[in-house]
Image (spheres, rainbow, N blue to C red):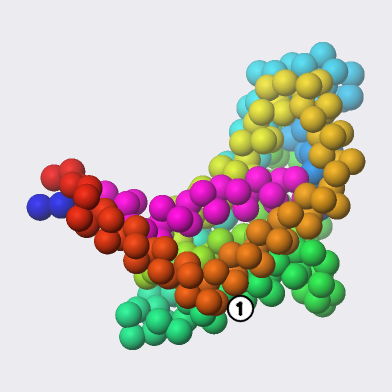
Amino acid sequence: MNSPFAETILSGSLLLAIPVALLAGLVSFLSPCVLPLVPGYLGYVTGLTGVDLQKQRRGRMLAGIGLFVLGFSVIFVLLGGAFGQLGTLITGPQNAWITQLLGVLVIIMGVVFLGGFGWLQRDAKIHAKPPAGLWGAPLLGITFGLGWAPCIGPTYSAVQLLSLSGGSSAAKGALLAFVYSLGLGIPFLLIALAVRRGMGVMSFFRKHRLAIQRMGGGILILLGILMATGVWGAWVTGLQYWFQTDVKLPI
């Protein structure tokens, strides 16, 4: 008897969606709404001053950023699981047109990421500030996750719309949200491990933020076109057929 978990992981839709979700998280980190705020987050969640940051107190900094990443990851995964469960009501073989509709929505998310549809650019920020330091780090992460900054909303929404393609489930939505959180959170952790070098890398990305924003929006629009034209579905079907015929799942 084949393992349901292995079948889920090796499904064509997830094999294509997981790298896209990881890339979407990275693009969110590099976006103009997040990248310039990283030094502030580093100081706030660790309770360190600028002098302490320069001394690279890595243990405390890594702990603070880890708790911060954990906070927003929990929010994203919970929302992803809920969205995936709701998706089971509308997705299925009899609703193949859903993928095309989702593709159009992903294209819209790409346009929003590029700055279009100004009314969708509004923040839903929570203005309550948790205490600075390690105790407040996970709370700040939760606040960050619920803030829906304009540069995070389109990419995260696109990942969740993608989770509905090829069949939806709570596990699939949560998994893609977790991968998205990794893409967004790992750069925070890497910078915490090497503050001075990380700040130098951030300076490079800040100089090229417009190009990064265009790249991110372009990726979302391309993904939406692939979904709307049926190419994405064809790739999913091809991968599923390949695994069914050439790959033996663990028993």
Compared to residue 178, the image places residue 165 above or below, namely: below
Is 29 in the magenta?
A: yes
Kindly identify which residue carries mark 1.
Answer: 104
Q: Residue drawn at (62%, 53%), measured in percent from left and top?
A: 24
Residue 118 visible: yes
Compared to residue 39, the image places residue 197 above or below, namely: above
Q: Residue drawn at (66%, 54%), measured in percent from left and top?
A: 145
- Tell me where residue 223 appears, x and y as whole percent: 59, 65
Q: Specify the quadrant of the image occupied by residue 236.
A: bottom left
The front one of 51 and 150 is 150
Q: Which residues are magenta?
A: 3-32
Q: Residue drawn at (80%, 43%), measured in percent from left and top?
A: 35
Magenta residues: mostly which secondary structure? helix
Compared to residue 59, the image places residue 217 above or below, namely: below
Q: Report the amino acid beneath label 1.
A: Val
Q: How many marks?
A: 1
- Tell me where residue 240 appears, x and y as whole percent: 30, 60
Q: Residues within 10 Å of mark 1 (few under 14, many from 20)?
A: many
